[in-house]
Amino acid sequence: MSARENLSALLATRGKGGSLESISQAGAHFNKDKTLTPSDFITVDKLDASKAITLLGGFAVSTYGLDPKVAYSMRNAFAKKYAQVVNLYDLSQADFISAISEIDAEIATEAANKADFAISMGTEQERLIKNAQSAIDKLVDANVSPKVKHDLLTLARTIEQKLAYAPVQKVAQVA
């Protein structure tokens, strides 16, 4: 089989792929046929992350002589920004590594911004509250031990503190 066929088979059969071993194998196939490029295998708008890691990592190993472990460490950029990475292979090794570092920083910034946005919108807190409510709803009233009752009262006090309001009874007395 040709290097192209072997690489196609590797991408088709690796399943979860994206491993150090699959990157090494892809690099060997790219070394056998220097006319191959990652673009030869990207036929869809959205490439599976594991295949992107295998394909782009293998090409980085072949093109720049990177150790597969170094290419594997770049997997986040390969998986999430493969369309950008495909255009970087004309760069020198140092510039390529620098560009990947910038992409990784961009991904980290996007993730931090997304997390900050979720926090500002209360979505993380909503999830935590729903989980707590679900756990409390599972309690059977008839089987509440003194320890569980104590824990529920402690939880109620904590909720009051978080909301920074007086208990309902005190509010009713003021009104």
Image (tube, grey):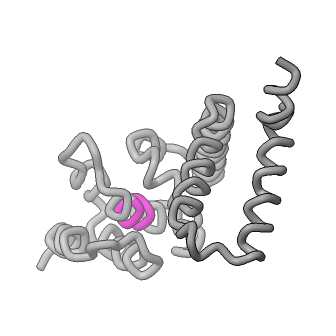
Residue 6's x, y, as percent? 19, 75
Task: Name the residue at 45% across, 44% down.
Answer: 81
* 95 or 115, nearer to the observer: 115
Q: Quadrant of residue 53?
A: bottom left
Q: Horizontally, is 4 left or right of 47 in the view?
A: left
| 43 in magenta | no
Vertically, is 120 above or below 112?
above
* Residue 32 makes an appearance in the image: yes
Q: Horizontally, is 69 left or right of 4 in the view?
A: right
Residue 49's x, y, as percent? 37, 57
Q: Residue furthest front?
A: 173
* 35 or 41, nearer to the observer: 41
Vertically, is 151 above or below 120?
below
Vertically, is 138 above or below 85?
below
Quadrant (top left, top right, bottom left, bottom right) of the N terminus: bottom left
Task: Name the residue at 35% across, 62% down.
Answer: 55
* 80 or 165, nearer to the observer: 165
Residue 5's x, y, as percent? 14, 71
Quadrant (top left, top right, bottom left, bottom right) of the C terminus: top right
* Residue 65 makes an appearance in the image: no
Dominant SS type (magenta):
helix
Residue 125's x, y, as percent? 65, 43
- Count the marks: 0
The residue stretch that appears in magenta: 53-58
Q: Horizontally, is 20 left or right of 144 in the view?
A: left
Q: Quadrant of residue 24?
A: bottom left
Task: Name the residue at 46% across, 54% down.
Answer: 78
Task: Name the residue at 43% across, 54% down.
Answer: 79
Q: Residue furthest top?
A: 175
